[in-house]
């Protein structure tokens, strides 16, 4: 294997390590959020993303980017959350083609209940991952990003 091939393999190994860390954390978050609030990780992500916006709303395309979902998957997810009364859709006043998704008061309350569970589970999952030799450098790197 030449130098160029070695660099590719190092990046590929890094990507596999990142995917393993992401997968283990997401599985823990999914279990904890489902048990406590009946939210999936992606549903929590939608509510959280909306709560961070001024006016608690976003265009559908923005929400799709924030959740890393396709437009059709985002629409299905928004439909489910809207059926549960956690968010609503409104027409954009200055662009009648635009649709905003907006967090409802019920959505904000559920997010407030889910946030401590999410944050505690995330911290616990990162602590556990830090004990795995292959994941420890990546977990430390994440901690360094928070300080920057």
Image (tube, helix red, strand yellow):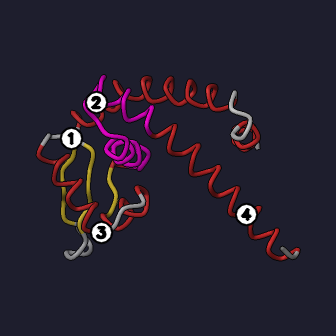
Could you say whether the residue bearing mark 1 is in a helix, strand or loop?
A: loop
Viewer-side residue, 66 vs 14: 14
Q: CA distance from mark 3 to mark 2?
A: 24 Å
Picture quadrant of residue 30: top left
- The reply, left or right, for residue 115 in relation to residue 134 is left
- Relative image position of residue 105 (x, y in whole percent): 23, 35
Viewer-side residue, 94 vs 78: 78
- Disc 3 designates what residue? 71
Q: CA distance from mark 1 to mark 2?
A: 8 Å
- Relative image position of residue 110 (x, y in whole percent): 28, 30
Picture quadrant of residue 63: bottom left
- Disc 2 designates what residue? 110
- Disc 1 designates what residue? 86
Viewer-side residue, 75 vs 102: 75
Which is more N-terminal, label 2 or label 3? 3
Inspect the magenta stretch and tell me whether residue 80 lies in it.
no
Could you say whether the residue bearing mark 4 is in a helix, strand or loop?
A: helix
Question: Where are the magenta residues, as a range?
Answer: 27-54
Please tell me whether residue 20 is drawn above or below residue 112 in the rendered image.
below
- Relative image position of residue 108 (x, y in whole percent): 30, 34
Label 4 vs label 3, nearer the camera:
4
Which is more N-terminal, label 1 or label 3? 3
Q: CA distance from mark 2 to mark 4?
A: 39 Å
- Disc 4 designates what residue? 11
Label 3 vs label 2, nearer the camera:
3
């Amino acid at each position: 294997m030449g130098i160029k091939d070695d660099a590719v393999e190092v990046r590929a190994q890094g990507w596999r390590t990142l995917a393993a860390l992401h997968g283990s954390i997401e599985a823990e978050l999914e279990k904890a959020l489902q048990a406590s609030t009946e939210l999936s990780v992606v549903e929590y992500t939608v509510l959280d993303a909306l709560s961070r916006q001024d006016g608690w709303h976003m265009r559908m395309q923005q929400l799709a980017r924030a959740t890393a979902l396709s437009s059709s998957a985002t629409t299905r997810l928004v439909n489910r959350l809207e059926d549960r009364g956690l968010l609503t859709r409104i027409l954009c006043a200055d662009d009648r083609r635009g649709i905003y998704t907006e967090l409802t008061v019920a959505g904000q309350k559920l997010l407030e209940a889910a946030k401590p569970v999410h944050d505690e589970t995330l911290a616990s999952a990162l602590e556990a991952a830090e004990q795995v030799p292959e994941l420890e450098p990546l977990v430390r790197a994440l901690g360094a990003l928070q300080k920057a």
